[in-house]
Image (cartoon, grey):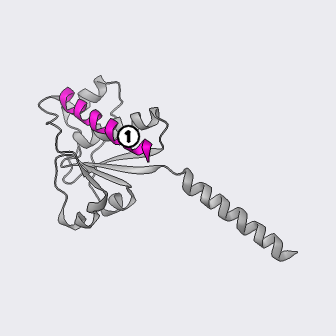
Amino acid sequence: MKSKTINVSLILLFVLIGYTVKAQDKSILFICEHGSAKSIIAATYFQKTAAENNLKWNALSRGTHPDSILQLATQRGLEGDGFNTESMKPAVLTENDILKAEIVVTLGCKLPEEFNRFQNKILEWNDVPPISKDYSAARDVIRKNINLLLKSLKSD
């Protein structure tokens, strides 16, 4: 009788582990040079749009050479769009960030050479204009790219 109890317990454990793994959100990482403009906007809008489409994704923003604060144009633009920017802070890109991400999107920046081995998960969005010149134009290109990406993720 003891072996049946152990077998049932193991089966329940595997079912629970399997359920937990399936329930976890996938991660997408957005990277720009300073981590204070394009990647912040992309992560913010990706998170919002994914949630609106009931997609379980977690979006992160990083910089290869991060600023200490958000660019003023980014802060004003996102706040004007209805987002709270108080907790948004540029952060430096780490290998662990890339390892955890299903998808990595660079926005007009080149990754350091040590990250070249991750090319299979990197998308490049080099069509985004500078935020400092025109927040609305940059945001609109980012949102267009996000919508195309989400459309492809929904069909997978």
Residue at 34% across, 42% down: 149
Q: Can residue 87 be seen here?
A: no
Query: Which of the two residues, 41 or 156, is positioned nearer the viewer here?
Result: 156
Rendering coords of residue 110 (x, y %):
16, 55
Counting other residues with Cα less than 10 Å from the Cα at mark 1, is it few (<14), some (14-19), or many (20 or more)? some
| Figure check: 76 above or below 9 | above
Q: Quadrant of residue 125?
A: top left
| Figure check: 77 above or below 17 | above
Q: Name the residue carrying label 1.
A: 150
Q: Which residues are magenta?
A: 135-156
Q: Looking at this rendering, what residue extends furthest in the left direction?
A: 133
Report the amino acid beneath label 1. Answer: Leu
Position of 66 with respect to 7 (left or right) is: left
Rendering coords of residue 90 (x, y %):
27, 46
Rendering coords of residue 83 (x, y %):
35, 29
In the image, is residue 137 part of the stretch drawn in magenta?
Answer: yes
Q: Secondary structure at mark 1?
A: helix
